[in-house]
Image (spheres, rainbow, N blue to C red):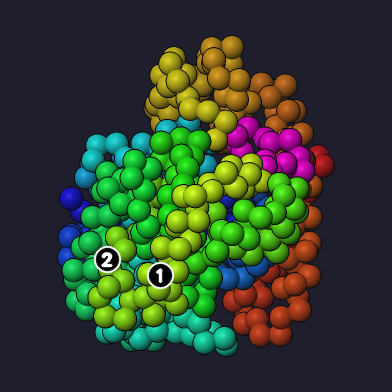
Amino acid sequence: MNFFFYDLETSGLDKANAHIMQFAGQRTDENFNPIGDAVNILIQLSDDCLPSPNALVVTGISPYDAQQNGMSEWEFCRFFINEIALPDTIFVGYNNIRYDDEIMRYTLWRNFYDPYQWHWQNNRSRWDLLDVMRMLSALRPDGLNWVYDEDGCKIHKLELLAQANHIKHEHAHDALSDVFATIDLAKLVLQKHPEYLRYMFKNRDKEELQKIIHLRNPQPFVYSSGRYDKRFTKTTVAYPVLQGANPNEIWVYNLRHDPEFWQNISPSEMEEIINAKKEAKEEVPLKIIKLNRTPAVSTIRVLDKGNGWNLIGLDPKTVKQHQQKIQQNPTFIQNMVQCLNQEWQADHELEVEEQLYSGFIQGGDVAMCQQIRDLSWQNPEDLKAISTESFNDNRLPDLFSHYKCRYFPQTASEREQDEYQAYRKRMFERQDVLFQKDWQEVQQHNDLNDHQQRILADLSKWRDELMKSIEE
C-alpha cells in the first residue's frame, strides 16, 4: 500500500468541460515519506477549450506555455494509467473527491479510458483530507493552529492552514506546491493525532462505513460536510432515514434541526421552502451521504470524550428527541426526497463529452475503446479503419469523431471535420459568455502583477485565435 498525493490546475470550474493544465503528484509510504521523484507536468489545451480568465489568473499558467512545454491530453491519459495508477495506490488530495477526481473522470472518458477503474481496481482506493480536517478542527482542535473568518468560524483552506502551521507553501494554486503542503499537513496530523488519523483512514472504506451508517437498526453518527453550518465547524449528528438510488447512497437527516417543522407543513409549502433554500445555497436538513466518496464520519461515542458535544453545539437530549420525532412520523422524509430529487435541467443539450454519467461502457465497446487507445499510440493512421457503426453505445461515434479531429485530424473524414467545427462553435459560444463575465471581473482588479497581466494578454490572444479558427 502507498499513497499518491495529487492536485490539478485546470482551465475552469466546469467539471465536465474544464481541461487539466497542470498535473502534479508525489507517491509516499504509509507515514507520508516520499517514494521516488515528484511528478509535475503541463498539459496542452485542445482547440475546443476557452479557459476562464479567473482560473488562469489564479494558476498563473498561460495556454501557450502549456502548448510549448506540455503533453497532449491523450498522451497524459496514457501516462497516468500506465505510470501513476499502479496497483495498491491510494489517491489522496484536498477536496479531490468533489473536484479533482471528477475532472480526472471526464478527462479519461473523452479519451476512451475507463473513468472509474483507476481509483478502485487492483486494490486501489482514494481518500480526501478536507473533511478529515473539518472534523479534526471540530472535535480535536488541540495541537494545530486554526484559521478563522470574520464571523469567528473556522475555515479550512489549504494555503491558510499551511501558513498558520508554518508549513512551507510558497506558491498556492501551483499544483506541486499544493501537493507538498497537503503531505506536510497530513504528517502534522499524524504527529499530533495519530489515532484519529488512522481511525479516519480506516473509515474511508465502504465496508467500515456501513457498520456506522445503515438502515437495519439506524443509529445517529457524527458527520462533517461542507454542506453543514460553518458556525459548528461543518460538523453535526446525522441519522440514516432512507436508501438512496443505489447501494452507495443513504439519505441522512441532520438532527440539529427539529423535524417537527417539516412534519407540519404541506408538500407544496415544503417544495417552496426547499427551492428557496437551494436557490440561496442554504442548508436543507436532509442530504445524501455517498459511501464511496470517503465521507468523514464517526460513531457518536466520539462526542463523549472531552467537550465533544459542546464543541459542535449539540447535546444528547436534543439529538434523542429529534430522532424519536422522525421515528414516530417519518412520512415527511419522502416528500423532502421528492423535492430534493427534482432534476436540474441544463440550459443546453449535453454534448457527448458531458455525458459521462449517462451509462457505463459495456460489452464489445470496451474492446473498441482499447483498440482506439492502442492505435493512437502505435499507428494513428489505422484509426481511419474503425467504423463508427461498430459502436453499440450511441455516445461513442461522436466522441470518436471529436477525438480524431482533436489529435489526429488527418484520420477524420471531411464530414467529421465539418461536424467537429460545428461542435467547436457551440462550445465557444457557451464558454465565451462565461469568459466575458470573468474578463470584466478580472479587469477590475488593481493588484494584478506583471505575470498575471501577461497571462491575460496571452489568454486574449488565445481567444482571438480560437474564434478565428472556428469562423474559417
How far apart are labels 2 and 1 at the CA level? 14 Å
Tell me where residue 378 appears, x and y as whole percent: 39, 27
Amino acid at circle 2: Arg
Amino acid at circle 1: Lys
Answer above or below: position of 446 versus 322.
Answer: below
On residue 403, the disc is none
Q: Horizontal placement of 46 versus 237: left or right?
A: right
- Is residue 226 visible in the rendered image? The answer is no
The image quarter in which residue 75 lies: top left
Overall secondary structure of the magenta section: loop
Q: Horizontal placement of 325 versus 460: left or right?
A: left
Tell me where residue 288 appears, x and y as whole percent: 50, 49
Residue nearest the viewer, comparing 13 with 260: 260
Query: Which residue is labeled 1 in the image?
Result: 317
Q: Residue at x 44, y 84 (%)?
A: 147
Does the magenta run of residues contain 345?
yes
Query: Which residue is labeled 2 in the image?
Result: 301
Answer above or below: position of 379 versus 356.
Answer: above
- Is residue 334 visible in the rendered image? The answer is yes
Answer above or below: position of 463 versus 162.
Answer: above
Q: Residue at x 50, y 82 (%)?
A: 153
Residue nearest the viewer, comparing 158 with 247: 247
Residue nearest the viewer, comparing 431 with 300: 300
What range of the chain is rendered magenta? 341-355
* Mark before the other along the chain sequence, 2 or 1: 2
Q: Residue at x 64, y 72 (%)?
A: 454
Looking at the rendered structure, the secondary structure element under dot 2 is helix
Looking at the rendered structure, the secondary structure element under dot 1 is helix
Pointers 2 and 1 in contact (CB under 8 A)? no
Report crowding for label 2: few under 14, some 14 to 19, many 20 or more residues within 10 A (C-alpha).
few
Tell me where residue 357 appears, x and y as whole percent: 55, 35
Q: Which corner quadrant holds the C terminus?
A: top right
